[in-house]
Amino acid sequence: MLKKRDLQDCHVLYDLMVHPDVFPFVRQKADSYEEFLFITKQTIEAEEQGLIISRTILDDWGSPAGTISLFDIDNKAGFLGTWIGKPYHGMGLNTRAKDVFFTELFYELGVETVYMKIRKENLRSNKAAEKLPYAVAANETRKALYEEINLGSIKFNLFEISKDLFTLYIMRQTNIDVLEGHIKEA
């Protein structure tokens, strides 16, 4: 489902990223394959320095489908950046990738809070964030951060994912799986 970023996936990822339904919402934009390759090299180096955490999202057959990253890491918190190629929209990859990524962030890498700033006009991503059972709308509860991310001309909604809420979600899912297993056995 996820793997560390590498240069071998750049051709496929670049072709997916430049689609007009995807490109406007990508944080690390590149106008050419060479620029995308350079940005990917920088991302790999930044991860080695602990400045970013970035993974390639894989489809069910192991092909690159998008990326998921934690940017601006500070004080055990960071901002999520995710994009999925147009052919993979609506297939559930985004939610599955987030579940795997958050598990790694919270339980292996010591992150406590993940923020998502989503452009207000990006209806697809806003609806996806609202569906996440562990994400909380934070425009009001994190007012200072909300105002900070909205200083420019582009306006964002802010969502927060805490380790505690994600843990409750995982525990609930585990209990549901166990209960469903018992029902099937009965």
Image (cartoon, grey):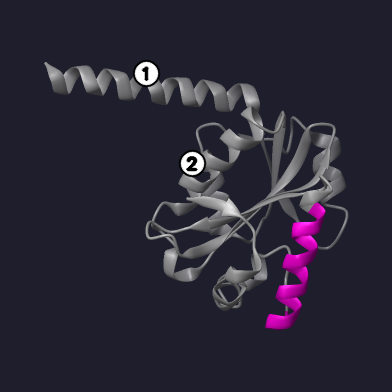
Q: Is residue 169 above or below residue 1?
A: above
> Where does the image place residue 111, in percent across and percent down from the top left?
72, 32
Q: Is residue 184 in sight in this rendering?
A: yes
Q: In front here: 139 or 14?
A: 14
Q: What secondary structure is found at the residue carrying circle 1?
A: helix
Q: Distance between the Cα atoms at labels 1 and 2?
A: 20 Å
Q: Which residues are magenta?
A: 31-46
**Residue in the image at 52% along x and 40% along y:** 100
**Who's the residue at 60% across and 70% down the image?**
8
Q: Earlier in the sequence, mark 1 or mark 2?
A: 2
**Image x and y of residue 39, in percent:** 76, 69
In the current view of this chain or complex, which residue is farthest to the left?
186
- Above-or-below relation of 31 to 156: below
67 relative position to 34: left or right? left
Residue 154 appearing in the image: no
> Residue 114 falls in which quadrant of the image?
top right
Tag shown at residue 155 = none
Question: What residue type is disc 1 on?
Answer: Asn
Mark 2 sits on what residue?
131
Q: Which residue is mark 1?
A: 175
Q: Residue at x 24, y 23 (%)?
A: 180
Which quadrant: the C terminus? top left
User: In the image, residue 32 lies at what x, y percent?
Assistant: 71, 83
Count residues near mark 1 (Cα–Cα under 10 Å), then give few for <14, some for 14-19, many for 20+: few
Instruction: Name the residue nearer the viewer: 22 or 157.
Output: 22
Quadrant of the rendered structure where residue 91 is?
A: bottom left
